[in-house]
Amino acid sequence: MPRQTIAHIDMNALLHNYQQAKIAAPQSQTMAVVKADGYGHGMLKVAQTLAEVADGFAVAFVDEAIACRDAGLTQPILVLEGAHSPEDLDLAVDYDLWLVMHQPEQIDWLIEFDRTLMPGATKPTVWFKCDTGLHRLGLSPQALHDALNQVPSSYLEKAVLMGHFACADDLSNPMNTQQLMQLNDLAKKYQLPISMANSPAIVADSHSHGKWNRLGIALYGAEPLNQSSATQSNVMLKPVMTLKAAIIGLRHIQSGEAVGYGQIWHAQRDSVIATVAIGYGDGYPRHAPCGTPVYIHGQLVPLVGRVSMDMITIDVTDLIQVPIIGDMVELWGANLSVTTVAEHVKTINYELVTRISTRVTKTYHNT
């Protein structure tokens, strides 16, 4: 029997979340973002589950896109980082991929690539990304102007003008309005449709919805909005991943005794400590502080002591139902939001779900 450290992936919840996004933005086409191994949920399993309903998929780089094509996916696949080299343009044609153009060098590669094409040859579909304030990737407005005037007009027939919010999880931030206004002004100037809305904007800002929306973290049922945001979500999401691990040890310790490496936690009373078969080698965050909640037998109990490579320790003294070896503990999921855990760990839910390691067995089911 394999080690009982398991990520249960609820495919019905995945489908539910995608449909919620479609309901929230009925005039848009919705891309399911499956990069980073489907945010830790399994890229190919996620994509194949959505294959009958998704308008398209988005990945980070060409290798991920090719894996999706090799798995039989036929929908549009957008490569968010675009071409990493001129050779990626050939792959985009071979595998029918859509490429984001976000650097002047990529525009140069595209123009040179086009010069080598035979008349009537297939051309890659390209989007143009404008830097409206995130200052990470994207063409400046002047570079965008130059690009749209340099590339052959045939590339503009299917082109989309893309932007990326800098403060998307807090839609009350005025930066979001500024960015959207700038992208809309450019789209009107060049007569191009837009793609600006990501998960937070899809669920809470209908003004940002464009021809294409990009559904990322909300697809997986994690809260896309900052908890302090005044903006409210318009959708009901269901968590897709429930991360569980088994109790492999139980011991009674006396008041004053310490638990774990560095003795960072000391019992303030006689206590019952359970050791759980998950650690930072599995992707559970090493910097999770004492008090980070886990869920067992209908109750939340605290992490105590330092997270080690293969194990954590939790204080089960107050459990009404006495735990035994083999009982399963939920680290996050159906009963404990990954966002709540992320807040304790001082990180974001994206990081927690994407860092799950290959040591964790993934099981796929329909509830």
Image: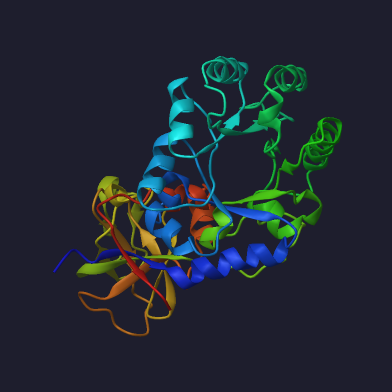
Identify the residue at the far bottom of this view. Answer: 321
Query: Residue at 81% across / 52% down in the picture?
Result: 207
In the image, residue 99 sits, relative to residue 339, either above or below, namely above
In the image, residue 319 sits, relative to residue 207, either above or below, namely below
Q: Does residue 70 appear to the left or right of 202 in the view shown? A: left
Badge count: 0
Question: Which of the 4 quarters of the picture holds residue 205?
Answer: bottom right
Query: Residue at 35% across / 59% down in the picture?
Result: 304
Q: Position of residue 313 (x, y in %)?
A: 29, 61
Query: Residue at 20% across / 75% down in the picture?
Result: 325
Identify the residue at the far front of this view. Answer: 119
Which residue is at the front of the view, 257 or 189?
189
Q: Is residue 42 visible?
A: no
Q: Is residue 322 visible?
A: yes
Q: Position of residue 201 (x, y in %)?
A: 71, 52
- Quarter in which the N terminus is drawn: bottom left
Which residue is at the front of the view, 345 or 166?
166
